[in-house]
Image: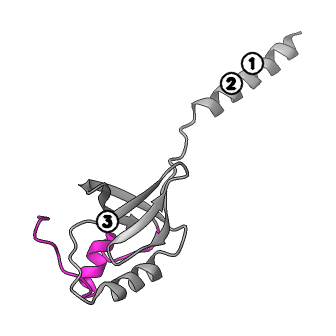
Amino acid sequence: MRRQLAALALLLVWGLALLLQPVAAQAAEVLQVRSGTLLQVGDHNRTYTVELACLDIPAGGDAAAAERLRQELPRRTRVNLRPLGNHGGTLVARVQPLQGGSPGGDLSEGLIAAGLASPSADCA
């Protein structure tokens, strides 16, 4: 009887430890690079269109910026989104790949450093 109670107590403690462990956060994943400033991102529950914040692409430079983003963000790349607001229903955010990525971490800063974009006037 004593052995059964000890086994039950051990099982109970093990079960509680599993239940009380923090659950790992699910990062958003890039589903598609739509343009030099727009990404389609999903978080296993929803999909979002995300506009890169604080970024102006010069006329005719969208294709080069989009190609650079496609190289840096293959499909299913996990990213951290830091929302700054919305623009016509599109989430405006700073986007940072969780592994590797642009200088400084932020994709907007990486495009600016590469000379493919310039900082926008509305971001300080």
The disc at residue 109 is none
Q: Earlier in the sequence, mark 3 or mark 1?
A: 1
Instruction: Using a 10 Å C-alpha cutoff, classify the residue at mark 2 as few (fewer than 14 neighbours), some (14 to 19) or many (20 or more).
Output: few
Residue 119: x, y in percent? Answer: 17, 75
Q: Which residues are magenta?
A: 99-124
Q: Residue at x 57, y 30 (%)?
A: 20
Q: Nearer the viewer, mark 3 or mark 1?
A: 3
Which residue appears farthest toward the right when viewing the image? Answer: 1
Q: Nearer the viewer, residue 98 or 54?
A: 54
Residue 101 lies within the magenta run: yes
Amino acid type, label 3? Glu
Q: Quadrant of residue 105?
A: bottom left
Q: Nearer the viewer, residue 60 or 109?
A: 60
Residue receiving disc 2: 13
Classify the position of the N terminus by image quarter: top right
Residue 7: x, y in percent? Answer: 82, 21
Left or right for 68, reference 16: left
Q: Nearer the viewer, residue 103 or 41?
A: 41
Residue 79, placed above or below residue 72: above
Amino acid type, label 1? Ala
Instruction: Using a 10 Å C-alpha cutoff, classify the residue at mark 1 as few (fewer than 14 neighbours), some (14 to 19) or many (20 or more).
Output: few
The disc at residue 9 is 1
Residue receiving disc 3: 51
